[in-house]
Image: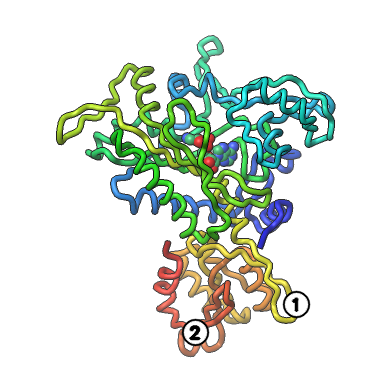
């Protein structure tokens, strides 16, 4: 069921999924804190991605590079000169906006500002009388470009301080460690390097909840391959990226490819997978054929050879790179929107459910004693299962209310301990989506949950 963004934000707060950042100090734009339920969901998303693209992938290796890097990295990557957004201020209400976003919103996505110069964007905004989305005014400053990188400094004394940056993407860590990984794993091209980590961007535009934030996590995978094989791998990664989402339970009609018409000068192909978010279709992840651009630039700027030596024919070359990049927080927003459901039960009662894939659900099961005097046995079941799974326990209120509470945070199974449990060591297991119940011996619970949550 489609959910509005306001509803999603409100339910995330009340269910301990996501809280507004720095809330008791009046908040801080485009920052969010993950609560006890949210952190489990996000960890499960990252685990599922890592399992698919590192653990189960042939010839892919993990990395956790530093957030702070030598500033030359960002010169080589081009971020210091061209990682900027075209910003305009509304003179009336003093809010700041991205010119390209204003054009996209005004044209309802029909005009793609990607290829426009600043002058062309200013002309469009003037001629189409694009008003300020905040106050409705029509009095803009000219476009100015702002670099999106957060700067900080490093040094012992004020005089010796050097400007450094919080990384705006994790990808450069993979590029600069390309030979370290290749040599230590003895990987042969083609091979991949994957990384999950924080990235920071001084985003000014309204974020649409966790869709666009100033601090976020990226899950990036760079596939190093020989020129000539690159386009086939690009197509393969498109398929793999889409399949990952479908396997997580996304409906095919909520996803679509958006092939880029205008490419960066070094790119051979690029596309996004878009998702139908509460605010409409928007980017979820990107897949790019980046050619040998990044490694060539790092070789040039570092003065260190990044040539790969082919062990079969001794040829030396800089590999091409297929990049697959997805934001963990943006995927979290898509997962939450996709899982949200309001089911009308017989009799008209509304049941709120988050229908997560069990692998993504924050708790795999809730242990519920039918009555409080069964808590000792129920606690023993909880203790047994906690060794293997995230389990929650609830003994407050009627069993019906407790089931609903678990439905609301997407717990796939409720395990009820009743008086028969004391006699024969069996429990009732209720499944979230169908609400069907089965009876199982306690000793079979671990295998049962293992099978159900596998991804
Ligand atoms: N290394 C390539 C790269 O960073 P990108 O399209 O700028 O490409 C990749 O970012 C992904 O990171 C996006 O598809 C999106 O999922 C996520 N992302 C980018 N900016 C974000 C932001 N401000 N907030 C949350 N997620 C973001």
**Percent x, y of residue 117:** 62, 22
Which one is earlier in the sequence, the residue at label 2 or at label 1? 1
The answer to whether residue 423 shows anywhere in this view is: yes
**Percent x, y of residue 318:** 29, 28
- The 10 Å Cα crowd at callout 1, few under 14, some 14 to 19, many 20 or more, is few
Work out whether 83 lies above or below 283. Answer: above
Q: Residue at x 68, y 48 (%)?
A: 279
For ligand 1, the image quadrant comes to top right
Task: Please state if 198 lies on the left or on the right of 451 as rendered.
Answer: right
Q: Quadrant of residue 226?
A: top left
The residue labelled by disc 2 is 439
In the image, 310 versus 377, the foreground residue is 310
Q: Element at badge 2?
A: strand
Tell me the number on the disc at residue 174: none
Work out whether 51 lies above or below 87. Answer: below
The answer to whether residue 328 shows anywhere in this view is: no
**Percent x, y of residue 76:** 43, 21
Name of the residue lying farthest toward the top: 159
């Amino acid at each position: 069921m489609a959910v509005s963004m306001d509803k999603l934000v409100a339910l995330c707060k009340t269910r301990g999924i996501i809280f507004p950042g720095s809330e008791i100090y009046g908040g801080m734009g485009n920052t969010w804190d993950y609560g006890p339920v949210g952190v489990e969901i996000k960890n499960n998303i990252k685990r599922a991605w890592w399992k698919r693209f590192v653990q189960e992938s042939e010839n892919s290796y993990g990395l956790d590079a530093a957030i702070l890097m030598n500033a030359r990295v960002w010169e080589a990557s081009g971020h210091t000169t061209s990682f900027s957004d075209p910003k305009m201020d509304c003179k009336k209400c003093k809010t700041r906006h991205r010119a390209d976003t204003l054009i996209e919103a005004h044209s309802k996505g029909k005009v793609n500002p990607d290829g426009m110069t600043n002058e062309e964007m200013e002309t469009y905004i003037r001629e189409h009388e694009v008003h300020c989305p905040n106050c409705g005014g029509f009095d803009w400053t000219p476009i100015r470009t702002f670099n999106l990188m957060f700067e900080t400094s490093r040094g012992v004394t004020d005089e010796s301080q050097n400007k450094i940056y919080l990384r705006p993407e994790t990808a450069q860590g993979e590029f600069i460690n390309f030979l370290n990984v290749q040599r230590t794993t003895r990987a042969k091209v083609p091979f991949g390097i994957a990384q999950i980590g924080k990235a920071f961007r001084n985003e000014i535009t309204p974020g649409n909840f966790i869709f666009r934030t100033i601090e976020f996590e990226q899950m990036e995978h760079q596939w190093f391959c020989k020129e000539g094989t690159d386009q086939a791998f690009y197509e393969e990664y498109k398929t793999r990226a889409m399949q990952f989402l479908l396997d997580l339970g996304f409906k095919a009609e909520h996803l679509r490819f958006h092939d880029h018409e205008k490419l960066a000068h070094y790119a051979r192909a690029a596309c996004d997978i878009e998702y139908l978010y509460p605010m409409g279709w928007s980017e979820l992840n990107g897949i790019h054929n980046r050619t040998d651009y990044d490694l060539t630039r790092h070789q040039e700027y570092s003065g260190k050879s990044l040539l790969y030596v082919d062990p079969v024919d001794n040829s030396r070359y800089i590999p091409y790179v297929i990049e697959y990049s997805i934001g963990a927080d943006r995927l979290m927003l898509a997962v939450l929107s996709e899982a949200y459901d309001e089911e009308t039960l017989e009799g008209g009662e509304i049941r709120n459910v988050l229908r997560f894939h069990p692998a993504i659900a924050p708790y795999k099961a809730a242990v519920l004693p039918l009555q409080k005097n069964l808590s000792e046995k129920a606690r023993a079941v909880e203790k047994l299962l906690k060794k293997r799974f995230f389990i929650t326990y609830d003994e407050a209120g009627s069993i019906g209310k407790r089931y609903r509470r678990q439905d609301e945070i997407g717990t796939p199974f409720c395990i009820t301990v009743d008086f028969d449990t004391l006699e024969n060591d069996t429990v009732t297991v209720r499944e979230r989506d169908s609400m069907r119940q089965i009876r199982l011996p306690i000793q079979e619970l671990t295998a049962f949950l293992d099978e159900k949550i596998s991804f």
